[in-house]
Amino acid sequence: MTGYRQVLAVPGLAPLLAVSLLARMAITAAGMALTLYVVLGLHLGYAAAGAVPAALTAGLALGGPLLGRLIDRRGLRTALLATVVLQAGFWLAVPVLRYPVLLGAAFVAGLLMVPAQAVTRQAIAALTAGPQRRPAFALESVQGELSYLVGPAAVILAAATLSPATMAWGVGGAIVVGGVAIAALDPPLRAPDEAPAGTAPPRRREWLGRGMVAVLVLAFGTALLLGGIDLAIVATLQQAGQVSWASLVVAVCGLASVTGGLCYGALSRPLPGRLLLGLLGVATVLAGLAHGWPWLCLAVVGTGLLTAPTLSTVSDAVSRLAPAGVRGEATGLQASAMSAGVALGAPVVGWAVDASVPAAGFAVAGLAGIAAALAGHLLSRRTRRPLAAASGAATPDRDPCRVGA
C-alpha cells in the first residue's frame, strides 16, 4: 500500500479524485435519471424512455474528442465553464421540455458533458511519474467502478421518495457542483518538463498511429464486454426464476472489480493490457456456465477482479502514448471508444440471448473482449509512438498495449 500513500500524497491529487468522484457518480446516474423522468414524469413507455439516455450516450461518444481538443487549445477552465453553464441550463429546463425537445437536448447535453473523467486522467498523467502512475490509474478505475455502483442506485432510491423534477434537478446540481469544484482546483494537465500550453501541437498523424489505435481497440472491446454483462446476468436469472437477485450479482461483480483494481495497483510488476482483456474475456465466457444466483455470484467474481485492472491499463497506455499537447484529445478519443462500446454491448448481447440461450450472452461478450485483445496485439506489433515531449519526434518504443500496464 506504499504506492497508494505516495499517490495520495501528491499535491492536489486526492482532492481532485474526491470531487471527480462526485461528478462521475452524477454523470453515471444521468441516463437512469432521464429514463425515470420520462417514465414517471412524462408517463411515456420504456421505449421512449430508453431513447433519451441513448441520445445522451451518443452525444458523449461524439463530444469526448471535441472537448479534449478545446482543453488542449483553450485551457481547462474555459472548457469547464462552457460545460457547466450548458449542464445547468439543461437540467433546470428538463421538467418543462416536451419529449421531442428533450430528446435533442439530451444529445447536446452529452456532447458538452462536464469532462470529469478525462480531466482526472490528464491530471494523473501530469502529476505522477514512474511507479506512481500505475496505482494512480488503478485508483481512477476504482473511482469509475464506485460511480457505477452508487450513482444509478442513488437515483432509483431518489425516484421512490422525490418528485421526478426534483430528482432531475438533484442529478444536474451534482454535475454542476462537480464541474465547478474541478475548475476551482484547476489541476495541472501538463508535467513541468512537458511542452507548455500554447506550443504548437503535433499533427494527428504523428501520434494517432497503430499503437494508439491498438489501445483504443482495447478500450472499445473492454467497454463492449462490460456493457453487455448486466443484460446477460438478468437474462440468466430470469430463466431461472430468480431475477430479483440480479442487483446482488451486479453488486458482487462491482465490488470484485474494486478489489481487483486496488490489488493490481499494489503489484510490483505490470501486466500487458491485451493479456488482461483476454483473461477478462475468458472469465466472462466461463460465467455463462453458472446457473442460479449463488453460482452466478461466484462466477462473476473472476470477471470483476479483472475489470478495473484492464481499464486502468488502457488509461495508463493512452496517457503515455499521447504527447502533452494533444492529451486532451487522446483521452477524449478513449472516452468515445468506451462510450461506443457500452452503447453496443447491450444490443449485441441482447441479440445473442434472443437468438439462443442466456449463456450465449456471456459467450458473445467474452468473445468480443478476446477478439479485441487479439486485434490490439496485431495492431501493436512493430509500432512506433511519438514521445510525449515538445518536439513530438517519433522513436521506437515498447509494445503500446504493455505501456503502464
Image (cartoon, grey):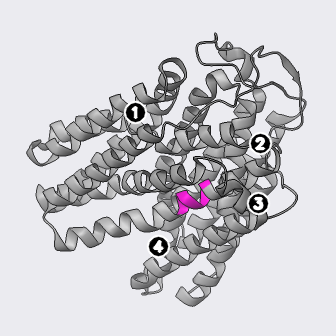
In the rendered structure, which segment of residues is drawn in magenta? 140-145
Q: CA distance from mark 4 to mark 3?
A: 40 Å
Residue 29 at x, y percent in the picture = 36, 57
Residue designated by label 2: 129
What amino acid type is highlighted by mark number 4?
Ala
Q: Secondary structure at mark 4?
A: helix
Front one among 285 and 22: 22
Residue 200 shows up from this direction: yes
Is there a contact, CB below 8 Å, between mark 4 and mark 3? no
According to the picture, the residue beneath numbered tag 4 turns out to be: 235
Structural distance between the alpha carbons of marks 4 and 2: 44 Å
The amino acid sitting under disc 2 is Ala
Q: Quadrant of the N terminus?
A: bottom right
- Give the residue pinned by disc 3: 3
Q: Nearer the viewer, residue 186 or 386?
A: 186
Tell me which numbered mark, 4 or 3, is placed earlier along the sequence.
3
Does residue 120 appear left or right of residue 192 in this picture? left
Among the two numbered marks 1 and 3 on one chain, the one whose residue lies closer to the N terminus = 3
Residue at coordinates 47% horizontally, 22% vertically from top-left? 70
Which mark is first along the chain, 2 or 4? 2
Please state which amino acid type lies under the numbered disc 1: Leu
Query: Is residue 143 inside the magenta stretch?
Result: yes
Q: Residue at x 89, y 36 (%)?
A: 398
Q: Quadrant of residue 28?
A: bottom left
Residue 133, compared with residue 261, is above or below; it is above
Q: Is residue 246 left or right of residue 294?
A: left
What kind of element bears circle 1? helix
| Local secondary structure at mark 2 | loop
